[in-house]
Image (cartoon, rainbow, N blue to C red):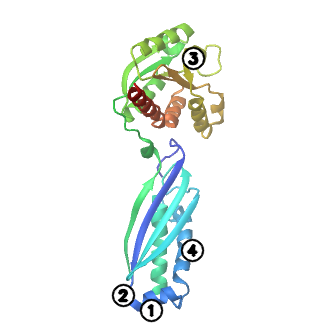
Amino acid sequence: MVDITSKIKTHRIALAQATVTVSRPETIEAIKNKTVPKGDVLEASRVAGLLGIKKTSDLIPDCHPLPIEFAQIHHNIEGFDIVIQVEVHAIYRTGVEVEAMHGASVVALTLYDMLKPIDKGVEIRNIKLLKKKGGKSQYAEKLSRKISAAVIVCSDSIAADKKQDSAGKAIITKLEKCGIENNAYCIIPDEVKTIQQKVQFYCGRQADMIILTGGTGLSPRDVTPEAIRPLLDREIPGIGEAARSFGQEITPYSMLSRSLGGLIGKTLVLALPGSTKGASESMDALFPYILHLFKVMEQIRHIDDAGN
């Protein structure tokens, strides 16, 4: 099975369709009048479809078990066709497309099974996905320009060449996947003044985003939040909350992180954990969703320009 632990939970929706075609008008009349010998065809297939949705992961080997929050099944009779539509919702890390198509398949097979004694020409056609929604692709922002970033590694031991940096490089890799230009990368010791000077330097160079990794723990030398917070024009509490909430599902120690984020002018500043795993997981929690901030700032600028 594909590893989905790095994904966040979002509202997932899928709509699938299948068509069952009969060969006789009498078959359609029997369905409408509920005179099919095996029973109420539409209701029986609806119930079977709901069971099929729930049992998808039991039958399709690579499908993840997931909590189905909502499912509905509709039948529309169009001439000799019975058009089945299955809609499935879940709040989870992976999509529900296969669940919707599996449900549609089970509905269609149930119709076939119940109708074959009275119609030998029944066919199942066109099982397909009509639409899906949710996941990172839904939240990918189309910005009018490229976003630039500077990555700052705050670590006494790395600055002294006693250790190699991997957290900063993991952040750069994540940025590249989001199409963000990494214009600067540096390593500095855990000193409040040094951190502040470096952040102010990149703000002066009009970096769109500054990401610091390290110094968000609880040791005496972990001072990144203390250095950053006085510089912020606006702290955005949800940034730290989102990173910790995501991490908490993986390790309970996430509660001890002091990650934070906010704005210095128009520059977004993020302070993330110094461990490679913590930095990588925090990036998964925040990106690409946090890029919506730049979309909002673009809209505000356009409103201000129109007002002037």
Where residue 224 is drawn, which disc sits there?
3
The amino acid on which the numbered mark 4 sits, given as a three-letter code, is Val
Q: Residues within 10 Å of mark 4 (few under 14, many from 20)?
A: some
- Secondary structure under tag 4 reads helix
- Which percent across, then down, holds residue 256? 65, 28
Residue at image position (49%, 78%) is 110
Q: Quadrant of residue 125?
A: bottom left
- Secondary structure under tag 3 reads helix
How far apart are labels 1 and 4 at the CA level?
A: 21 Å
Write down the residue under mark 2. 23
Q: Nearer the viewer, residue 101 or 15?
A: 15
Q: Nearer the viewer, residue 14 or 215?
A: 14
Write down the residue under mark 1. 118
Q: Nearer the viewer, residue 141 or 93?
A: 141
Tell me if residue 299 comes above or below residue 1 in the rendering. above
Specify which label sits upstream in the sequence, 4 or 2.
2
Specify which label sits upstream in the sequence, 3 or 1.
1
The amino acid on which the numbered mark 2 sits, given as a three-letter code, is Ser
Specify which label sits upstream in the sequence, 2 or 1.
2
Write down the residue under mark 4. 47
Q: Nearer the viewer, mark 2 or mark 3?
A: 2
Most distant residue in the top direction:
193
